[in-house]
Every structure is written in C-alpha cells, then in structure tokens.
Amino acid sequence: MLLNPIQARALLEYALKERFAMLAVNADSPAAIYDCLLAAKQAEGPIIIESSLWQLEGISFGGGDAVLGLGRYIVDTALLANSDEFKDVPALYHTDHIKGPKAKNILENAVKGVSVRLENADIRLSPSTISLDASELSNDENISFINGLIEVSKKSGRPITVEMEAGVDSGLTPPEEIKALVEGVEKNNPKYLYIFAPGLGSRHGYSKEGFPAFQPEMVARDIDLIEECIGRRIGIALHGSSGLSEEQLKQAVNNGVIKINWATDSLALRSKFAMEYYNNNAEKLVLGHKEFKITAMDNGVNQYISKNYVPCVQKRIEIQGGGNKNEGFWKYSGILNN
Ligand SMILES: [Zn+2]
C-alpha cells in the first residue's frame, strides 16, 4: 500500500523505534518498481521506491517532461502498491536528487499533487516523502527552499513530509551546520522534517577502494544533536551506500539510520542480468528463429532480470533489518483500521 505523507511519518517513526533501515531503491523503470515491491513482499518488509530527475525525464516516464514523468511514476507505483498482490507491503514513494533550475517547479507540483485527469475526476497525487538535492545550494538556500515547499503545502492544503540533506558527499557534516539546517526549518515550520541526511563519509557512485572515511557511529551523535535542537528524534538517511560492507551497513542501522539509498549497486545488478540474457540468447534473436518473438519482447528480458534481481533486493532488505516488519507496523500505525 502506498502511504500518503502523514502515514509515511508513522513508518519513519516505527523504523527508528525498531532500529531497522528501509531500503530506498532508485528504481529506473516500471519493471524495477514491480521487482522492488515483490522483493519487499517476500521479505515481509516495507520498501521505499524513489526516483531522481533523470528517471522522471527519462523515456520510461516523462520523455523530457519531469512533471509528466512524476505523474506517471506515482500512478504506476500507486496502482501496483495498492493492488491485491502488494497491499500488505507498506511502500513509500520518495523524490530523490531533484536539482537545478527545474527543481522548484517540479517539487512544487509534487507538493500540490500532479493532476491526473480521468473523465470527470481531477485526482491529485503526491509523493509520500520529498527531498531535494542540496549539493549546489548554500545552507540558507537549502533552508529557504524547504520552507518554501512547506508554504506551498499549507496554501494547497496538501500534507508534506520532508527529508533534508546536507552535503552528503562532502565528508562529515559539522555539528554547527546540522544545527543551522534543522533549526532553520523547524523554527519556522515545526514537525515537517522526518529524515535528515548528513554527510557520513560515504560517497555517491562506487569506490573500489572502499570507504575508509565512513563513520557510522556519527549517526547516533547526529540524532542526539538534532533532538537537542528541535526536541524530537528523527532518523537518518544514508546516501551513497553502494560498496559499503554488510558490517558497515549494520553499524549504521544500529546507530539509527532508517533509510538507505541504493542506486549504483542496483543498476549494476540489473544491467549485468540484462547483458547475461542477451548474451545467452543471441542465437534466438535472429529473425526467423522460432523463439524470436518470446525472446525479443520486453517481458523476456524483464522476466530474466526479475528472477535474478529480486532475491538480491530481498537479501539487502534483510541485511538492513527490514524483514518481517510489516505485521508490527500495521499494528503500530493502525492505518489498516482507519
Ligand atoms: Zn543520494
């Protein structure tokens, strides 16, 4: 079931209380969204499906128009996540790494809800949680961007739940910067921030050398610091997790990471399986071969990827402590009874 922004808060609180981290997969295609929900169902754990600007503008969703892409992405995720097959899986849709000159327009549309006009109904759909890419923003710009989105939420009467990020690739975020960022939002707009993404020494992309600078113990310090600043405990998001060891991930979770973004490793798996499929089936992909059609169609390659990719996602959910959490969450939140 795709959770709305208010329901999402209960899941984020539950993850912090139960000390597990949800896997946030940067899902690149409709097939990847399906596979993530299937892996979560098999793990009996929640899942976060997220998209960045490049997916929203990509051919599978917006074809150059990110707002159209956002609408298609949410419709796709909502229809699947609310289907009989997946309605027991708590799912969030999150906007990740939206930056540049289009960011304001895209995210304001996200908050107001992308309009899906069907016959006489004008249905509006919003992400469960929202973040923006702050890598090119000053602290003041970051704060004012988020406060601006909260104002849009208030004016439009549509809820918003926010992940705020510091410069996640720039090493450890100093305490005074964390304080300035969270207070800059909370003092103007209390209780919209539910996730904070500080720099922890990890990096986006992949490092063969590993991440000697990664300091998972800083997570606990950051949570305490945020509580001192705003009087609430909120969980931490870990960006740039591809390449971290199982041990490093578990340490991060034990210290209070509730959301682990996963993109590069996921893409590496999907592209590896696609390559295997085409290499293994090259002789069938010749016109006139009796299995040409079944091999060439989109479903052929996607079935093969799914069979191999889904167990990897399920394993990753379980490493992060996210397996077997659904029954407990539905009880804790009471969402299914409302
Ligand atoms: Zn990231």
Image (cartoon, rainbow, N blue to C red):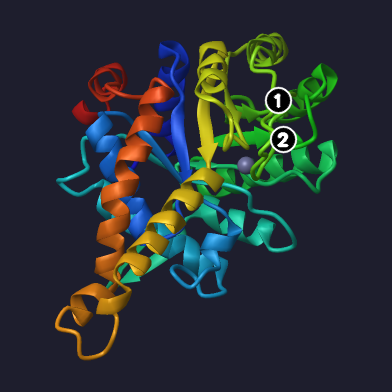
Quarter of the figure with residue 107:
bottom right
| Percent coordinates x, y for residue 250 in the rendering | 50, 17
- Going 63% across and 49% down the picture, which residue do you hit? 97
Q: Earlier in the sequence, mark 2 or mark 1?
A: 2
Neighbor class of circle 2 (other Cα within 10 Å; few <14, some 14-19, many 20+) is many
Compare residues 221 and 214 and report the one nearer the observer: 214
Q: Amino acid at mark 2?
A: Val
Q: Is residue 187 above or below residue 205?
A: above
State how far apart marks 2 and 1 are (Cα). Answer: 7 Å
Q: Is residue 44 above or below residue 20?
A: below
| Percent coordinates x, y for residue 4 in the rendering | 39, 40
Q: Amino acid at mark 1?
A: Leu
- Label 2 sits on a secondary structure element that is loop
The answer to whether one can see residue 78 in this image is: no
Disc 2 residue lies near ligand 1 with CB under 8 A: yes
- Report whether 93 appears left or right of 330: right
Q: Is residue 87 above or below residue 126?
A: above
Quarter of the figure with residue 257:
top right
Compare residues 238 and 139 and report the one nearer the observer: 238
Which image quarter has ligand 1? Answer: top right
* Image quadrant occupied by the C terminus: top left
Q: Name the residue that disc number 1 marks.
A: 200
| Percent coordinates x, y for residue 2 in the rendering | 33, 43
